[in-house]
């Protein structure tokens, strides 16, 4: 199957920017997604980017896509303690456009 | 507006027991999915149903069966539970299986098989 890779942990200070990185393998992916999971909850869609875009900005979130390197990043500006969660990158693939998720990055925001 | 509802929230089974995980969505979505989440492995697709009346295998279907009971409900059955099936199970739905149709997740069922 397809492969999506993320680093497992990231710690930042409150007020700093966080950058979570992801690499994927399917060059035919049409959309790439970022999901957020808080403790004891399901995944919540944060944002997504269409493959013909290089960047998408949504309030404090900026998504950058480098199709040549198959690299996706999520930048959270002015990170707050409420941003502490696990962040999953996902790519779509296959005829039914199933999603393949990365292993998730645990973001810890320190006071 | 409940979204995607899963029951039960927690379950403990002995090896060999069977059980069914229930999932219902109230968003009139066509497509529904079952994922399992294991530490360090992200979410892996077990089965999905692109539309009412159809089901297809995902990445890790062995040991599971599914039923798309109607448009709202998609159940996951473990006929003979094994310790390797200890996991957190998430149901999700989307308007359709297209890439621009995001998934909406339930809050998960934490299953332990002893």
Image: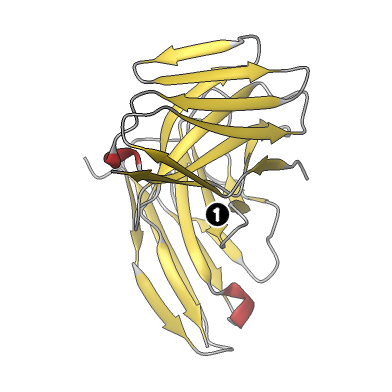
Relative vertical location of residue A96 with respect to residue B70 in this rendering, above or below: above
Colouring style: secondary structure
Mark 1: few/some/many CA within 10 Å (<14, 14-19, 20+) = many
Q: Position of residue B5 (x, y in %)?
A: 32, 53
Question: Is residue B74 toward the left or the right of residue A22 in the image?
Answer: left
Task: Name the residue rendered at 73%, 18% in the picture.
Answer: A67
Relative vertical location of residue A28 with respect to residue A3 in this rendering, above or below: above
Chain bearing mark 1: B
Relative vertical location of residue B36 with respect to residue A56 in this rendering, above or below: below
Q: Nearer the viewer, residue B23 or A32?
A: A32
Q: Position of residue B17 (x, y in %)?
A: 53, 87
From the image, tell me which residue sits under label 1.
B35
SS at mark 1 in the image: strand
Task: Name the residue rendered at 51%, 63% in the picture.
Answer: B76
- The residue most toward the left is B1
Task: Name the residue rendered at 74%, 42% in the picture.
Answer: A3
> Is residue B87 visible in this depiction of the protein?
yes
> Is residue A93 visible in this depiction of the protein?
no
Relative vertical location of residue A72 with respect to residue B92 in this rendering, above or below: above
Q: Position of residue B111 (x, y in %)?
A: 46, 73
Question: Is residue A57 toward the left or the right of residue B67 in the image?
Answer: left
Q: Position of residue B52 (x, y in %)?
A: 51, 43
Q: Nearer the viewer, residue A59 or B94?
A: A59
Q: Nearer the viewer, residue B97 or B108?
A: B108
Looking at the rendering, in which quadrant would you find the N terminus of chain B?
A: top left
Q: Nearer the viewer, residue B70 or B14?
A: B14
């Amino acid at each position: 199957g397809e492969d999506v890779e993320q680093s497992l942990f990231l710690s930042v200070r409150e007020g700093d920017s966080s950058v979570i990185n992801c690499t994927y393998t399917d060059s035919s992916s049409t959309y790439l997604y970022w999901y957020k999971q808080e403790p004891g909850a399901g995944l919540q869609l944060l944002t997504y980017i269409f493959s013909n875009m290089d960047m998408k900005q949504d309030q404090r979130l900026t998504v950058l896509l480098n199709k040549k390197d198959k690299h996706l990043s999520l930048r959270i500006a002015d990170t707050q303690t409420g941003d502490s969660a696990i962040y999953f990158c996902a790519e779509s693939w296959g005829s039914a456009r199933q999603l393949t998720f990365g292993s998730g990055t645990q973001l810890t925001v320190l006071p | 507006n409940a979204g995607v509802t899963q029951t039960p929230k927690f379950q403990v089974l002995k090896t060999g027991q069977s059980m069914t995980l229930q999932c219902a969505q109230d968003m009139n979505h066509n497509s529904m999915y079952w994922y399992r989440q294991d530490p360090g492995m992200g979410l892996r697709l077990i089965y999905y149903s692109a539309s009412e009346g159809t089901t297809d295998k995902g990445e890790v279907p062995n040991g599971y069966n599914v039923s798309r009971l109607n448009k709202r409900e998609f159940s996951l059955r473990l006929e003979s539970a094994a310790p390797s099936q200890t996991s957190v199970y998430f149901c999700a739905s989307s308007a359709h299986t297209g890439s621009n149709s995001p998934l909406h997740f339930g809050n998960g069922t934490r299953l332990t098989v002893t």
